[in-house]
Image (cartoon, rainbow, N blue to C red):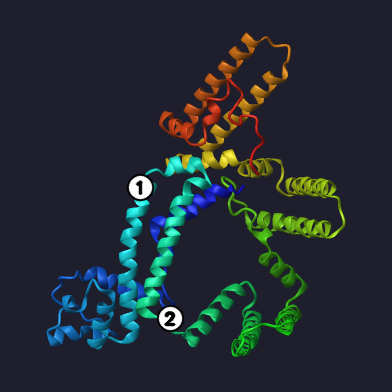
Amino acid sequence: MSVRWPTYVSLTLNVALFGAWLATGKHPDRSVRASTAIRARPADAAEAEPKAGDAPVSAPASTGLRWLDLSSEDLRAYRDNLRRAGCPEATARDIMRAVINERFNRRRLELVQPFADRYWDMLAGGDKAFKSIGDRLGSMKEERDAVLKDILGDEPSDPAAERARRVEGWNENWSWLPASKAAQMVSIEAKYQKLRDDLEAEIGRRPDGKQTPEDQAARKKLADQIKTEREALLSVEEREELRLRESGAAQWAENLHGFEPDEQELRAVARLRLETDDAAKRLRGEKWEEKDLKAALKQSEEQLQAKIKGVLGEERYAQYDRARDGDFGNLSRVTERYGLPADAAVQAFEARKAAVAAVEQIKQNASLPEPERRTALEFIQRETERALAQALGNEVLATYREHGGAWVAGLVGGTDGVNSPPHR
């Protein structure tokens, strides 16, 4: 199951630690080379090594200029020095972009490192724990973008490069079709992309820049036309495959921990989910009382799970259902962090299930005297801790108890969500 805040945590830290938000411009290949060149040439380097295709940058080697003569803490001066030295504009832009990114990268690391050291504390805190760093990283990105625009101006458009990127993407999107049919689909995409571009350009040339209902109708007409041409080219099976691929139902297993479906399972469950999504849309389009709609949607979900169970079988469905449980996801993240085998999370999860069931049984026994009830709960807690230590080891158990395993201490009192339903 997808647990929203751990996904947010993972994305935030990946962005923070690895600089995904520092991706720059429309020419990443040149940016990487420029960035590497900057790192290889400290400010006091004697000369810049010439590279093929970068002849103007090698000018300092023949004129006596050093990199120190070009670089400057003042970004405008740095840019102007490169231009006066004869550096091609595209190369100068790549160099300046890399310099600006590196300066902000140092600030970003200074900001992120204290938070990175507190990862597990923050993980336990959920979304709110990451709001502060997320807001500050967002502000820093806005500041960096403003500096880039101030020093470099607006990025020049490159229609040929943009077209090439589009074609590359279309080829990837249609690679599952036979080669001849894929080529025809790419041609259809290109034709209608040009029509869409022409329409937007026409709208953009208007003095007032206002859009009209006719513009929306024109967009819809183009969308309907490309859909019609696609469907005319594709077979019934290919149309169904396209619909499945373009639906969110195809990503049903993306965030499941400990369950990896094969292609047959992936497709079968995706079809069932797509059918259920269609049915839910129909239900929402009908006139229902809110409570009746909720009941109908709940019944539809129950029917979906029964169908999935029929497709997967008892054993695989049990694995799938466990993977949907939020607590199993927490256990999986802990065991993965410590490099434990996948079975460790399964064993710990089964221990939790057994503890929950035992506590619930005791709670339902109204005739049990309080002293005996407490003795039984204490026994369950001891046995659960022993089982968890056996599955995880004492060190990992200590971490888990602090970050997601508070329910262990709550067994005696029946608190801390021991009997709460799993997060789906």
Q: Residue at x 72, y 44 (%)?
A: 313
Is tag 2's residue or tag 1's residue first in the polypeptide sequence?
1
Q: Is residue 363 above or below residue 293?
A: above
Residue 32, percent across and down? 35, 72
In the picture, measured across the screen, residue 361 lies left or right of residue 75, that is right
Q: Which residue is mark 1?
A: 114
> Does the CB distance between marks 2 and 1 fall below 8 Å?
no
Q: Is residue 175 above or below residue 61?
A: above
Q: For the C terminus, give its image quadrant.
A: top right
Q: Is residue 334 above or below residue 42?
A: above
- What type is the residue that disc 2 sits on? Glu
Residue 150, percent across and down? 37, 76
- What type is the residue that disc 1 sits on? Pro
Q: Is residue 142 above or below residue 263?
A: below
Crowdedness near tag 2: few (<14), some (14–19) or many (≥20) residues, C-alpha within 10 Å = few
* Residue 328 lies in quadrant: top right
* Residue 53 lies in quadrant: bottom left
Q: Residue at x 80, y 47 (%)?
A: 294
* Residue 166 lies in quadrant: bottom right
Q: Which residue is mark 2?
A: 155
Which sits in the foreground, 313 or 160? 160
Which sits in the foreground, 403 or 238? 403
In the picture, measured across the screen, residue 177 lies left or right of residue 285, that is left
Residue 147, percent across and down? 37, 72
Q: Is residue 168 visible?
A: yes
Crowdedness near tag 1: few (<14), some (14–19) or many (≥20) residues, C-alpha within 10 Å = few
SS for dot 1: helix
Which sits in the foreground, 254 or 297? 297
Q: Is residue 341 visible?
A: no
Distance from disc 2 to disc 1, alpha carbons, whole Å, reads: 34 Å
